[in-house]
Image (cartoon, grey):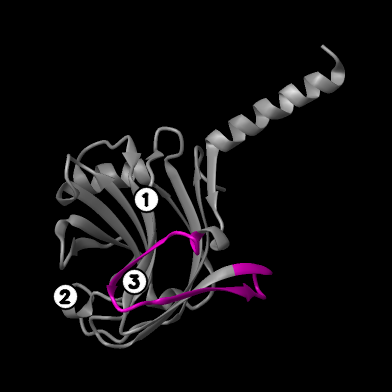
Amino acid sequence: MSSRLLAIVLLGAWLATASARALTFTPAQIMKWKAKSFVGHTEYRLVYDPQLQQPVLRAQSRAAASGLFYERRIDLDATPWLSWRWRVERFPAVADERAKRGDDFAVRVYVVVRDGWTRLSSKAISYVWSQQSAAGRRWPNPFAGDKAMMLALRHRQDGGGWVSEKRNLKADLRRLFGKDFRHIDAVAIMTDADNGKGTAIGYYGALVFSADEPQ
């Protein structure tokens, strides 16, 4: 085998291994995800962030709730870690985030698993930047009950700058639902302010699934 052919084979093997160990969704790719509207339409658009010096996704909700969904199976045995960056510019005005009338968040990241044969059997984690709950607090979604668990990763006092997150999805799903899941069936982002009829503005960077814990 010639040295050039050997180099091509080794490069192909390295790329295959790298792709199996990481799955990255840039803001531009997230913009192409399927839009789902619950109430009106949150405005999602690409903007240039001078701090990160790269494009990010800006979301603004005016009394609306719609998200961007990637609905394909992702193997958590191969890539159990999900990491991303987000920032809040404006929190929605709410009285109680745990009540239906206050279930609005400037930034959310969802993961969804199918725990049976129907959509009604789905379970979800909604990672949120909370105004009222301390980081690490969890509670059932007021609309879906314990089939969709809310998990606060940040509190309002954490500031308005960019913050990096990393979650072991397999561990979170086991902790919140009491069983092991091999796959997730969807990942999504959403900025919403429909219940309080207010305005929310948030920003999202890339979402990265990886085999190893991000540094």
Q: Earlier in the sequence, mark 3 or mark 2?
A: 3
Identify the mark at residue 66; answer none if there is no mark: 3
* 164 lies above or below 89: above
SS for dot 1: loop
Q: Indicate the position of residue 154 as horizontal and vertical percent values.
A: 39, 67
Q: Going by the picture, which residue comes out furthest to the top? A: 1
Could one spot residue 164 in this view of the protein? no
Q: Earlier in the sequence, mark 1 or mark 2?
A: 1
Give the label, 3 or 2, closer to the camera: 3
Residue on which the image places disc 1: 71
Identify the mark at residue 100; answer none if there is no mark: 2
Find residue 147 and report its image quarter.
bottom left
Find residue 99 and report its image quarter.
bottom left
Label 1 CA crowd tier, 10 Å (few <14, some 14–19, many 20+): some
Tag 1: amino acid: Glu
For the residue pair 139 and 43, the one nearer the viewer reads as: 43
SS for dot 3: strand
Tag 3: amino acid: Ser
Q: Residue at x 52, y 44 (%)?
A: 23
- Compared across the picture, whether 32 is left or right of 135 comes to right
For the residue pair 136 and 128, the one nearer the viewer reads as: 128
Q: Going by the picture, which residue comes out furthest to the right? A: 3
Instruction: Give the residues drawn in magenta, as a range.
Output: 30-55
Q: Earlier in the sequence, mark 3 or mark 1?
A: 3
